[in-house]
Image: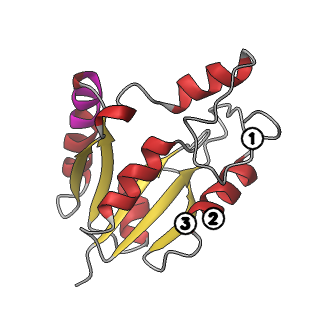
Amino acid sequence: MKNIAVFPGSFDPVTRGHESIIRRALLLFDKIIIAVGDNPEKRAYFPFEKRMHWLDQLFGKEKKIEVRKYSGLTVDFCKAVNANFILRGLRTSADFEFERTIGQVNKVLDNRIETIFLLTVPEYTALSSSVVREIIINGGDPGKFVPDCIDLGGKK
């Protein structure tokens, strides 16, 4: 049995924190599926296609990474792609409390799927997609917070 992890998120935009978690997790899993949530109820800042493109640019040459679209419950997506792990990054104790609740609910929904948490490296503890969006919206330079290959349309 392969150890396949799903790393779900909106990646609106992808940050250096996301990249760090995924690259560090490559040592732990045979395959990581970056699952980009497409939720029509949630209004994204960047178009879905652009977010998928960025992740393909960033990880396209990595044989152990696949970028996929998903909607619905993460555990259902995990079952569909034969993943036995959900990978999540933790920045703060507030993240832990939120993610623990989601992980416990997912465990009730399917007890075969484990949630694995990786702590962010200290320099990315304050970094989130929301913070990067605020920087962009207010005319700041987000370059230090997103991977070098990400083109934010002149916003970097």
Pointer 3: what residue?
A: 59
- Farthest residue, direction bottom: 1
Q: Earlier in the sequence, mark 1 or mark 2?
A: 2
Give the alpha-carbon distance from disc 1 to disc 2, as whole Å: 15 Å
Residue 100, compared with residue 116, is above or below; it is above
- The image position of residue 11, as x and y in percent, is 56, 44
Circle 1 packing at 10 Å, graded few (<14), some (14-19), many (20+), is some
Colour mode of the rendering: secondary structure
**Amino acid at dot 3:** Phe
Pointer 2: what residue?
A: 56
Give the alpha-carbon distance from disc 2 to disc 3, as whole Å: 5 Å
Q: Are marks 2 and 3 in contact (CB under 8 Å)?
A: yes
Residue 30, compared with residue 94, is above or below; it is below
Which secondary structure dominates the residues rendered in magenta?
A: helix
Q: Is residue 134 magenta?
A: no
Which of the 4 image quadrants contains residue 30?
A: bottom left
Pointer 1: what residue?
A: 152
